[in-house]
Image (cartoon, rainbow, N blue to C red):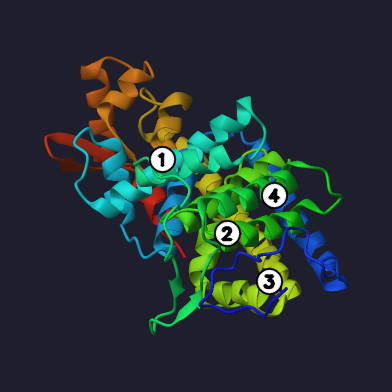
Amino acid sequence: MSKFDSKLPYNDLPELPPGVEIETKNILRKTISAGRALAQLNGTLMNLPNPTLFIDTIYLQEAKASSEVENIITTNDDLYKSLVADKKGGNPATKEVVSYREALWLGLEELKTKPFITTNLCIKIVQCIKQNNASIRNTPGTTLSNTKGEVIYTPPTGEAIIREKLSSLEKFINEDNRIDPLIKMALIHYQFEAIHPFSDGNGRTGRILLLLYLKLSGLLDTPAIYLSEYIINNKTEYYRRLRAVTEKNEWEEYILYMLDMIEETAKKGLQRLNKITILIDETVDEIRTKLPKIYSKDLVEILFRLPYTKRQFLIDENIGNAKTVGNYLMALEENEFLHSVKVGKEKLYVNHRLLKLLEEK
């Protein structure tokens, strides 16, 4: 293989698995601790009375973080208001984040009927993220540059070559090659980013694939984890280690980075989950004490499904008719459980304690 040149299309990108030792002592040791942290998070999620309760909130937080990696910035406030209100916000960044969340849900639904990660699934995901008919890159000239404008990487070019490399990656993902799934996840992520199959949306598609692979491999029954938050906080290191694999074949440091990401994110996710669970229990006790006539398990679940709610959500869940649920929401606001806010002509209610908890770093 010729020497890597950042200005030439990397059509010689090697297939997986790499031709170097990937199960070093350091990597195997880290795999054990990362796997343990992931198992603890998975166990806690599965033991919740309603494991799906926080899913939308968690996926929106992941969507927000993943988009921030690409410098698409929105606020939690804009994000939740846009999702809950009938009058959708005109903020393009918020729309991109909501599209990411829809793409993640789409991927999870696809896995239910066809439990494989394929090129076609990747295309469906990027089309959902970008809300267009994007497909495999078929025009030359794609390069990746650093902040100084210097070309640091030129991905493979030519639709036939890109499809060939995706086909090889697809085979590697879905066959049993006796590689620890956490190590395999890191290899898959590098390869997808190196192929860079789309004109835009590769980073976000690649991070959705991470979550789908955790589900597919049985590591997380519900892939409720904020991986992108770790990448934001360690962005320079992330790109440096990806480049070191490409330029110097340095796989160990990159794989250790990815295992660190899994371990730290799982631990943080577990802490956040425990805090939310405590907050729910406290809220249940307080509503039972202050407003015993309106308390129900279903009502509390609606208040914690997303930080924002509205009258129609309660009606849809048969909590009561329009007048009854209006009185409930008024009582909850008077007792400081919720704060109301106008969005267009709608009145939304924010669970301010939940929102504050989600915004903790």
Helix, strand or loop under label 3:
helix
Expressed as whole percent of the image width and height from the top left, the position of residue 13 reads: 66, 65
- In the image, 125: left or right of 49? left
For label 4, the residue is 168
For label 1, the residue is 128
For label 2, the residue is 195
The structure residue drawn at horizontal position 58% and vertical position 79%, both measured from the top left corner, is 5
Identify the mark nearer the N-term, 4 or 2: 4
State the separation of the CA atoms marked 1 and 3: 29 Å
Identify the mark nearer the N-term, 1 or 3: 1
For label 3, the residue is 254
Judge the density around disc 1: few (<14), some (14-19), many (≥20) Cα neighbours within 10 Å: many
The structure residue drawn at horizontal position 55% and vertical position 44%, both measured from the top left corner, is 277
Expressed as whole percent of the image width and height from the top left, the position of residue 210 reads: 61, 51
Front-lying residue, 267 or 245: 245
Up-down relation of residue 335 to residue 37 (above or below): above
